[in-house]
Structure formats: C-alpha cells, structure tokens
Amino acid sequence: MRVLLVWPNCDIADAAGVRGVVFARVWRDLGAEVVFVTHSAKPNLPTDVPVRFLRLFHEPSDALHLLTSGRALRKVIRDSRADVLVTSSPPATVAWQAARAARAEGVPLIVDVRDLATQSLRAVTGPKLRYYVLDRMEQVAYRTAARLMAVSGIMADVLRDGYHVPPDCIALVPNGSMPFDVPRREKDIDGVFVGYFHDAGRRPRDLIEALCCVHATRPGSRFAFVGWKPSPFAETLAKALREGGVRADLVPPVPREEVGPWMARAKVGLISLADHPVFRTAVGAKTYEYLRAGLPVAALGVSGDSELRRLIEGEGVGVFSADVGEFAAQLAALLSNEARLGALSQRALEVGARYDRRAIAQRAYREVVEPVSRRGA
C-alpha cells in the first residue's frame, strides 16, 4: 500500500513532527510505501525517513504559494500513486490544501486531529477574522475526510457535536511517547516543566503563583523549566519567580537526548493549561513523556471534566486541580511525602508503558489506514 503523508514538519524534537515521523517509520515497517511530504525543513531531521519538501500555504507569508502548491501537491499524489493521503490538523492551512488535492485526485483522506488549535487561539486571544477563515478550512478538511483520528475521547465528542462529523468516521488515536534514557540519579529538583512555557494557553502566571505558594510552605523548593525562550514576557515571568523567592533553572531548548537527564533529576512533572472549556480535550505529549520517565504528574488544569483530569485521577498518577491555591497545597503535600512519590512513580511507569507511540501507530495503520485506503476499500 502507498501512503502519502502531508505533514507540517518532520522535526523529531517537535510534538507534531515526531508523531508524523513515527507514523512513517511504523507504517513502512508494516509494509507500506510511505512518501513523507512536508512544508518545513526544521533542524532535527530524521535520518531514516526520506522526506520531500514542498512549499505549501502554511503561514500568511506563504499566501503566494496558493497559486502553485495545489497543483504541485496533486502531482505528488499522481506520481506516488497514493492509495491514501494522511494529513495533520493543525495547521488548518495544510490540512485544507491536502483535502482539496485528495478530493481532486479521488484519493481517500485521513485527517489526524492533534489539537483544536483555532478554538484554542480564539479562547486565548479573542475573536479575529483569521480564526473564522481557519475554522472554515478545518471544516473543509474534516468533511472531506473518510476518517478523522482524534487524540482524545473528549475531542472526538467535540468533532461529533461541534463539527457534525459522523461518530463512525472518528477513530481514537491517542498521543504517546517513545522509550528514552532516563539515568538514575539524585532527585535534586522538585518539579520540571518541559516545553514552551510562555504561551498564554499554558496559564504561566497562575503556575508561577502556585510555585511561589509552594516555596512559602517549603522554603528551598527548586524547579526547572526546560525549553525557556527569552522574550519580554519571559523576563516578566522570570522576575515573578525571583520576587517569589523560587529557585528556578531557566533552561533554553535542548536536544531530545538531554531532556531525560533533566527529568531524572525531578520528583514531579509539571503541566498547566488555561482554564477554558476548549482545553478539556488536551493531553500534551509531554504528559506521556513524564509518565514514561516515571514522574508523577502535577497539573494545573481546566475546571470540571477534562481529558487530563481523567488520565491523572483515573489512573492514579498524580495530582490535578483547576484552582491555584488548591493545586499549590496538593503539590506541596506530594513533595513532602516520599512514600507517596515512590508509589506514584511506579504507577506512572506502568501507565506510561501503555501509551507507546509505536504500538499506537501500529493500531492506527491496521484499524484506520488500511480499511480506508483504495486497496482496503
């Protein structure tokens, strides 16, 4: 079977890139001919997956490529003799182009919905005309697709109820993690946050307020932020940490092989999400990496039911609250209880092993890609 992956990037240090690259690797191992087409040549390229770069309409600055990218993508479909086209949303722009090309060439389309990005942006920054356009692009992609792959059950509900996608067209394909080396060493950091912290959707000010509260009850608490990028807003956050007396390591983005040692030093993995209904669908990829590393998860999340709350409380792998004060109290109590930390760490390892990216990709191929492809039809 010939699979055409049209993906936003193939950066194996990026959440979107690594998901697409693992799909390509696993599906190829299962016997598929995989053509990986991407817009962005980011620095951490896979060495074992052939990649073809095609200038697509990705950002507003790429608008001129609308004149040529559609024809170019259709030519790739014909040249590769694709039996199925699989694309990613976000970005809505790439998914929209892939949907139009697949429809024009009569190739079945699968859209991997990793995030409800347009709704998230609207929730954080307010309504804008471009969000209306992106929403329309998402709808075109979703309604063109033979199947959608949703990363969470609540996201599947939103696609069904909000986008009117038939339930039998939605498959649950969760995020996960790959095994990685976490050396055994002294736990000299109370909590680690891995990834881009400064986004408004991360609720950064509230998390810092919570960490300052933890410091007030546990003086000397130490936290690390791995992936910290300098900016005026980042400096404001750093100042708040200093004024709160919090000892914090502000670490710039590091290669993937250097993330494990930081996790090895931490007692808890930190997550924060804006308290808005759209984020009920989200479980960040780093959550599964924390679990795979044996880190209990401490999440400042969304009020009410959410996918992250279901994972943490349902599986018993950490603490969760939407309230800053309650979260701080839970985190401080957890950090003061070595026995509970040890039990949660063991549970995290057990649960994390169930979310193996390769196994998830294998199930997606057999249960979604094969049945949808022209050969499977």
Image (tube, helix red, strand yellow):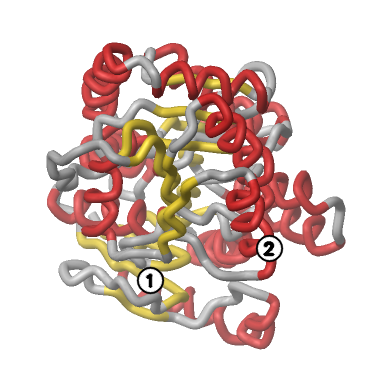
User: Which residue was labeled with disc 1?
Assistant: 37
Please report the residue visible at 64 percent of the width from the left and 55 percent of the height from the top: 237
Q: Is residue 139 visible?
A: no
Q: Is residue 377 left or right of residue 197?
A: left
Q: Is residue 139 left or right of residue 72?
A: right
* Above-or-below relation of 315 to 162: above
Left or right, 195 with reference to 360: right
Amino acid type of the residue tagged 1 in the rendering: Val
Q: Residues within 10 Å of mark 1 (few under 14, many from 20)?
A: many
x 68%, y 60%: residue: 236
Disc 1 is placed on an element classified as: strand
Q: Earlier in the sequence, mark 2 or mark 1?
A: 1
Question: Where residue 10 is drawn, which disc sits there?
Answer: none
Q: The C terminus appears in which quarter of the rendering?
A: top left
Q: Is residue 252 visible?
A: yes
Q: Measuring from the top left, give residue 48's x and y in whole percent.
A: 16, 68
Q: Quadrant of the N terminus?
A: bottom left
Picture residue at 43% right of the left edge, 79% below the top: 75
Q: Which residue is mark 2?
A: 233
| Disc 2 and disc 1 in contact, CB within 8 angstroms | no
Measured as percent of width and height from the top left, residue 225 is found at: 45, 52
Q: Residue at x 48, y 27 (%)?
A: 218
Residue 351 vertical placement versus 257 (above, below): above
226 or 77: nearer the viewer: 226
Q: Is residue 151 left or right of residue 288?
A: right
The amino acid pointed to by label 2 is Phe
Q: Nearer the viewer, residue 65 or 204?
A: 204
Q: Which marked residue is nearer to the observer: mark 2 or mark 1?
A: 2
Q: Quadrant of residue 65?
A: bottom right
Q: Is residue 236 above or below residue 71?
A: above
Alpha carbon separation for disc pair 2 and 1: 35 Å
Q: Label 2 crowding class (10 Å Cα cut-off): few <14, some 14-19, many 20+?
A: few
